[in-house]
Image (tube, rainbow, N blue to C red):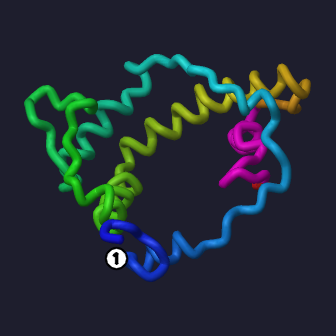
Amino acid sequence: MPGRCDSQNCASKGERLLITAKAPQVVRDLPAALRVQETLQFDQCNYNLREQISSLLVGADVGHFPNERKALEDFEAIPSIFRSFPARQRLCEVLTEASDFLAVYERLVLEVLVPWLRQRLEKQVGSLGPSHGRSTALSALFLLVFNGRYIDV
């Protein structure tokens, strides 16, 4: 079937590895407090990720903005970004090399997301212990969930 990607019909080694990879083993369900969808509000001027992403996309060669407004919603990605592993890799490279974006993103996670998640968890399970210190906050954030399973940091 054209356009279908399976272990025999993929354009790249990365896609083949992804398709044939063993599914993560869930060792425990997420706490109920983390399974309820909620909307998190934050100061978008203080954590201006939209502007950072728009600037990155201009130089990423994965699409274009049709006007000078450069609103994220208007970005037109090249069609191959959805089919091409190398195009997606290029976008990942651009993001991982973007120190300004990553700094804003890290601040958002540490200053907004971690305390918000901690509060949600503490409502369900009680105190999670001291909240000072960066590693403690990150541990609380990911209590510790990665790829659908608990991990230790």
Specify whether residue 134 is painted magenta: yes
Say what amino acid the circle numbered 1 marks.
Answer: Ala
Residue at the image position 30 percent from the left and 65 percent from the top: 84
Q: For mark 1, does the 10 Å Cα neighbourhood hold few (<14), some (14 to 19), or many (20 or more) residues? A: some
Q: Determine whether the residue tagged by mark 1 lies in a helix, strand or loop.
A: loop
The residue under the point 22% across, 54% down is 79
Q: Quadrant of residue 26?
A: bottom right
Is residue 90 rendered to the left or right of residue 61?
Answer: right
- Give left or right: position of 42 versus 72: right
Q: Position of residue 150 (x, y in %)?
A: 78, 51
Boundaries of the magenta span? 132-150
Residue at the extreme right: 126
Residue tagged 1 = 11
Q: Quadrant of the N terminus?
A: bottom left
Residue that appears at 53% across and 17% down: 41
Question: Is residue 10 placed above or below 42 in the rendered structure?
Answer: below
* Residue 50 placement: quadrant: top left
Q: Is residue 147 above or below residue 143?
A: below
